[in-house]
């Protein structure tokens, strides 16, 4: 579902992402972990065709991000922590608008909205104007908007940022439920407890470089630590200058 080879992004003399190679498979929730500024968002924007690589290649659900960006956009849904909504529209109006962009019929749209209402507990957000939303209400509709067309690949970039405990619980349960054949969810976060709960495998990036890709069990076994946060710091301490942690 995701193949990345030697992907690099530079801005002048600054290298935001350096020579990243990894793959992720259908049926996975694949974690992307790292501190702020590690290169996570740059990588996800490259995969979503919002940025163009300086070098290297990437395919998403079989579509090359440079040669066929329109095909990539049809099969991905993207959420980040800072996305907004038109203040004068209700949640239902937002979702119907985006469904129309994907060519969905009225009956398909109504059915899909009902499905997402159940999965994300949208409730009254559907018929309240977005300008009246709390952070949690807004993020639920942002997520529903991203998946209205049932994308093969869902990219969540710090999607739990600013959510209260109830909205965060709904989000994590939703992410866990996305595991299915022919589907991939990429979950980017710096909150290690979230990654422990929902991710099947995870990539750790630091200063634009890939440190490791492994399961939670593999990372804990390799570092000898009892939880992911402690293992994360152990891996970063073991990263040689300009290199990656030895696998």
Image: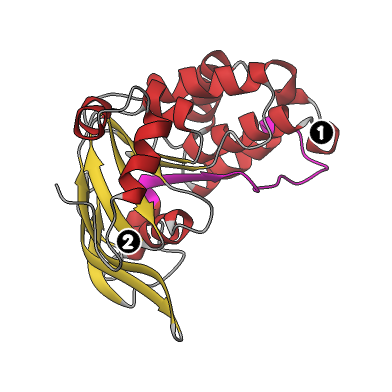
- Could you say which is closer to the camera, residue 222 or residue 127? 222
**Left or right: residue 184 compared with residue 163:** left
Residue 30 x %, y %? 31, 36
- Could you say which is closer to the camera, residue 66 or residue 54? 54
Per the rendering, the mark at residue 209 is: 2
Secondary structure under the numbered disc 2 in the rendered image: strand
Per the rendering, the mark at residue 129 is: 1
Q: Is residue 128 magenta?
A: no
Q: Is disc 2 in contact with disc 1, using a CB cutoff of under 8 Å?
A: no
The reply to whether residue 204 is visible in this rendering is no
Q: Quadrant of the N terminus?
A: top left
Q: Is residue 85 magenta?
A: yes
Q: Residue at x 55, y 34 (%)?
A: 143
Residue furthest left as drawn: 247
Residue 48 x %, y %? 41, 56
Residue 219 x %, y %? 25, 33
Secondary structure under the numbered disc 1 in the rendered image: loop
Of mark 2 and mark 1, the one earlier in the sequence is: 1
């Amino acid at each position: 579902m995701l193949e990345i080879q030697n992907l690099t992004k530079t801005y002048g003399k600054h290298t935001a992402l350096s020579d990243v190679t990894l793959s992720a498979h259908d049926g996975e929730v694949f974690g992307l972990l790292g501190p702020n500024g590690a290169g996570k968002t740059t990588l996800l924007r490259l995969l979503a065709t919002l940025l163009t690589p300086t070098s290297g290649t990437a395919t998403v659900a079989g579509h090359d991000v440079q040669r066929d960006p329109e095909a990539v956009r049809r099969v991905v849904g993207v959420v980040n922590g800072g996305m907004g909504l038109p203040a004068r529209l209700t949640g239902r109006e937002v979702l119907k608008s985006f469904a129309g962009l994907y060519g969905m019929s009225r009956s398909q749209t109504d059915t899909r909205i009902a499905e997402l209402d159940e999965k994300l507990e949208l409730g009254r957000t559907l018929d309240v104007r977005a300008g009246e939303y709390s952070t949690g209400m807004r993020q639920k509709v942002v997520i529903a908007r991203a998946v209205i067309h049932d994308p093969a690949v869902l990219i969540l970039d710090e999607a739990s940022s600013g959510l209260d405990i109830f909205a965060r619980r709904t989000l994590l349960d939703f992410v866990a439920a996305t595991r299915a054949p022919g589907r991939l969810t990429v979950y980017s976060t710096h909150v290690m407890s979230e990654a422990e709960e929902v991710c099947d495998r995870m990539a750790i990036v630091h200063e634009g470089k890939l440190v490791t890709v492994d399961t939670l069990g593999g990372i804990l076994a390799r570092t000898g630590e009892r939880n992911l946060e402690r293992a994360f710091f152990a891996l970063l301490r073991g990263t040689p200058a300009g290199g990656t942690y030895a696998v």
